[in-house]
Amino acid sequence: MLNNFFRPKLERHQVNMRDIWFQQDGAIDHTMRASMQVVRQMFPGHVISRFGDVHWPPRSPDLSICDFFLWGYLKSKVYMNKPRTLDDFKNSIHQEIEAVPNEMLERAV
């Protein structure tokens, strides 16, 4: 997911990977050795996670932008299109992510 989807999006927007931090929750599939290796390679020294450079506890009550804004917003937009197949669903997700206005993201931060 990170290499195939997230990294190309960041590169397309010319994001300097050394300038950003990556935060994730402590879910087991996010903190497995293979997952953490990929994250550490992409964001050396800038990982906020259960086993990251900055510790983030599993099941933390703190919310991220994705928790309080992005997932609900995307869900409402994607389901408004009433996707009928898995491919329609995936395409709708991609389209809606691309359509999120930069101004909206800036206000959420």
Image (cartoon, rainbow, N blue to C red):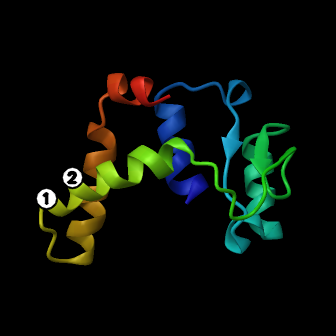
Residue 99 image point, x, y percent = 26, 38
Determine the residue positioned at 83% across, 68% down. Answer: 33
Above or below, comparing residue 31 to residue 19 in the picture: below
Using a 10 Å C-alpha cutoff, classify the residue at mark 1 as few (fewer than 14 neighbours), some (14 to 19) or many (20 or more): few
Above or below, comparing residue 88 to residue 47 in the picture: below
Q: What element carries label 1?
A: helix
Determine the residue positioned at 53% across, 24% down. Answer: 14
Q: In which quarter of the image is residue 36?
A: bottom right
Above or below, comparing residue 13 to residue 75 in the picture: above
Determine the residue positioned at 74% across, 56% down. Answer: 38
Query: Left of 16 or right of it: where is 90?
Result: left
Residue 17 image point, x, y percent = 68, 31
Q: Distance between the residues labelled 1 and 2?
A: 5 Å
Where does the N terminus fall, quadrant-wise? bottom right
Disc tally is 2
Residue 43 image point, x, y percent = 75, 40
Above or below, comparing residue 62 to residue 30 in the picture: above
On residue 77, which mark appears? 2
Q: Which amino acid does label 2 sit on?
A: Lys
Q: What residue type is labelled 1?
A: Met
Q: Which of 72 and 42 is in front in this view?
A: 72
Query: Left of 76 or right of it: where is 57?
Result: right
Residue 24 image point, x, y percent = 66, 53
Q: Give the residue number, with chain letter if any, for mark 1.
A: 80
Using a 10 Å C-alpha cutoff, classify the residue at mark 2 as few (fewer than 14 neighbours), some (14 to 19) or many (20 or more): some
Q: Which of 74 and 69 is in front in this view?
A: 69
Q: What element carries label 2?
A: helix
